[in-house]
Image: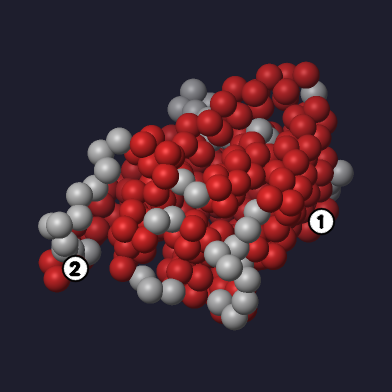
Amino acid sequence: MLAGSHNGFNILFVLDCHIASCFHEPYLQGITNWKKDHGCLYAFPGQACTHGPIVGGAFIQLYGIRSGIRLAFIVALIMGLISLLMQQMLIKEDEKKKDVSLQAEKNPFRMLTIMSPSLRNLLISDIMIRFCEQIPYAFVVIWCLHHAGVSPVQFGILTTVEMVTAMLIYIPVAYLADRGSKRPYVVVTFLFFSFFPLAILFSRSFSLLVIAFILRGLKEFGEPSRKALIMDLAPEEKKAGMFGAYYLVRDIIVSVAAFGGAYLWSLSPATNLITAFGFGILGTTFFFIYGKDLS
């Protein structure tokens, strides 16, 4: 990226959002209502995510690709160090909730042996959906700049549109999901993931890309419900360990998508995006057939 990659500024707002989210992540251990509380916690960091894309795009526009990317990384690094310092100062461990009688599982892969079939089906479908997301992930910015002809600042605006959309739906959707089954919200979320690559494929102007990025923001529609479902389906005494094992296995497998995505893009952008769409539909269909709620 420091050598002048065209999508380097994209990392700025990714880091910006990640930093804001990580700052609130420790609080997730103590929340009692995963759907509503998750929506509230992630709506607030979402406000920070709306600034990063525009700032990153402005750096590129004003200082050029190489200098702009380097400046973006310097700012992101400073923000990261400040957030780590604030995290250590402000987040305190609740000593009253410690239970020395419970021993944590040291081997996360051993958790897979006690994973319920319902949670395993959610994991399988989630892996396919993340393939749909990650196969074109690094190339979306290239498509926007070189195929749709938008500027770096316009791409920053598009990403802000995505973040604002996600932020606006977090709390109301979490509230509605709390009143019924989580499964329909997860299915709808997976559909939004699936159709974004197809929307990008047919977006050749800024106005069409705005619609596509609103669709991308809507993928957060059922994220509070999906994470709450993971916790519901995990064993009562091993919820934290199962949650970590779930993400560890998912992300290790999905990391392959980065290499596959590069190869598919080298064949053609359409091949990359259509393949991603195919994985999304496959994952959605799998969960629709085999996915179950706690009830």
Name the residue located 29 percent from the left edge and 55 percent from the top edge.
Answer: 83
Looking at the picture, how far across and down is residue 17, in whole percent? 46, 54
Image mark count: 2
Front-most of 77 and 180? 180
Residue 154 in sight here: no
Q: The C terminus appears in which quarter of the rendering? A: bottom right
Of helix, strand and loop, which one carries label 1? helix
Asked which quadrant contains residue 234, the reply is bottom left
Looking at the picture, how far across and down is residue 267, in whole percent? 78, 19
Name the residue located 78 percent from the left edge and 37 percent from the top edge.
Answer: 278
Looking at the picture, how far across and down is residue 177, in whole percent? 60, 74
Callout 1 crowding tier (Cα within 10 Å): few <14, some 14–19, many ≥20: few
Name the residue located 65 percent from the left edge and 23 percent from the top edge.
Answer: 260
- In the rendered structure, which amino acid carries the disc numbered 1? Ser
Q: Residue at label 1? A: 207
| Residue 97, disc | 2
Q: Earlier in the sequence, mark 1 or mark 2?
A: 2
103 horizontally vs 122: left or right = left
- In the rendered structure, which amino acid carries the disc numbered 2? Lys
Of helix, strand and loop, which one carries label 2? helix
